[in-house]
Amino acid sequence: MEEKGCSREEVLALLAGYRSRDVPHSRIFSSMCTVPHEIAVAAHALFVSTNLGDPGLYPGTAEIERRLIADLGDLLHGTGIGGYATSGGTESNIQAIRIAKKLHPTEKPNIVVPASAHFSFDKTRDILGVETRAAPYKEGSYTVDTDAMAELIDKNTVAVLAVAGTTEYGVVDDVPAAAKLARENDIWCHVDAAFGGLVIPFLKNSAPFDFAVDGVSSITLDPHKMGMSTIPCGTLLLRNPEHMKLLSVDSPYLTMKTSFTLTGTRPGADVAGAYAVMKYLGREGFRDIVAGCLENTRRLVSGMEAFGYKTVLPPVMNLAAFHPAEIPEGWKVSRTRAGHLRFVMMPHVTRDVVEAFLEDVSRLQ
């Protein structure tokens, strides 16, 4: 740190220089996050100094969090849903398994997850000391084989996981079958819908994945993905609000004397941003945005197939995977563990972006 500070103009010019080195969203196909909605940015600025880690000081912001959880719970067919706004899917997943472990104490706890499980469950294993057992994909599919899951469950299993909108292929596991296993074994069923939670409800003939499914105990959903909130904003949603008490620790010097979150200090700004987008768009607005993303996904697939690129499977939502092939320089496209090209068609991937990409692909032919 220098002895004397710089002018505001100098600082902002310095930061602008660093920001210019970042990849512009117009070239990014690999991210499940997107450009925040303008109303989220405005709300973020209004609440930028709030701290939900000490909610007694910010009762208005805390009420926004409660309303956000209630509205998301309602969207996911829940009644009286509990939970809180997290830093993202990783925290939500850890906390869900933390509850499951407390509900089912055992010396050697394990969880049964799909092969598609997010890497946050590797962190969960290390932090909570639970064994992670991965069930393979069902043959001819990138969804979990629930029969294989059943074989991995034993007396030390505390939870089973299903994914609704997998990170790599955007498919939805058979949540009813996973939840049935949980009911039969009297264990927790967690659904990781960090990405799909704000896509699947707006699809036609969508697969069942939420609290409408008997046996689903908790759901991860990230508003900073398809909810277009500012980063970071995740949520953990609980069918039974009483289970929040299992996360509680004493916080004697704060206005609220117990804390149930994984992090201490928590921003209220991103929570306000998420709530603002939901209030501004409503279900109709989200339905239109998802429809636009799906239309751009179809255009990408048709264009790529015209150039000889082969899809791994028909897209279920706004994520498309292709067999390995060359990609034009300057575009950020990720690859799955199997090496497949992975395109996430977020709201910032407009029709113009798709056409510009396909134009560059044509030059490879």
Image: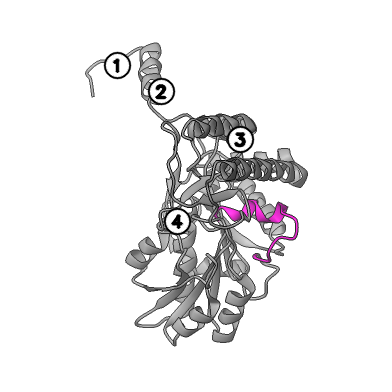
Residue 91 in which image quadrant: bottom left
Nearest to the eye among marks 4 and 1: give it: 4
> Distance of mark 1 from mark 3, alpha carbons?
31 Å
Q: Report the front residue among 190 and 333.
A: 333
| Disc 4 to disc 3: CB gap under 8 Å | no
Give the mark nearest the N terminus, 4 or 1.
1
Could you tell me which secondary element the residue under label 3 belongs to? helix
Please give the residue where the numbered disc 2 appears in the rendered image: 20
- Amino acid found under the numbered disc labelled 4: Thr
Q: Position of residue 204 (x, y in %)?
A: 75, 56
Give the mark nearest the N terminus, 1 or 2.
1
- Amino acid found under the numbered disc labelled 3: Ala
| Quarter of the image where the N terminus is located | top left
> Distance of mark 4 from mark 3, alpha carbons?
22 Å
Please give the residue where the numbered disc 3 appears in the rendered image: 40
> Distance of mark 3 from mark 2, alpha carbons?
23 Å
**How many numbered circles are shown?**
4
Please give the residue where the numbered disc 4 appears in the rendered image: 90
Give the mark nearest the N terminus, 2 or 4.
2
- Amino acid found under the numbered disc labelled 2: Ser
| Other-residue count near label 2 (Cα within 10 Å), few / some / many at <14 / 14–19 / ≥20 | few
> Distance of mark 4 from mark 1, alpha carbons?
37 Å
Q: Position of residue 63 (x, y in %)?
A: 64, 48
- Amino acid found under the numbered disc labelled 1: Gly
Could you tell me which secondary element the residue under label 1 belongs to? loop
| Other-residue count near label 1 (Cα within 10 Å), few / some / many at <14 / 14–19 / ≥20 | few
| Other-residue count near label 3 (Cα within 10 Å), few / some / many at <14 / 14–19 / ≥20 | many
Q: Write the start and end of the magenta stretch as one range.
A: 194-209
Could you tell me which secondary element the residue under label 4 belongs to? helix
Above or below, comparing residue 231 to residue 240 in the picture: above
Could you tell me which secondary element the residue under label 2 belongs to? loop
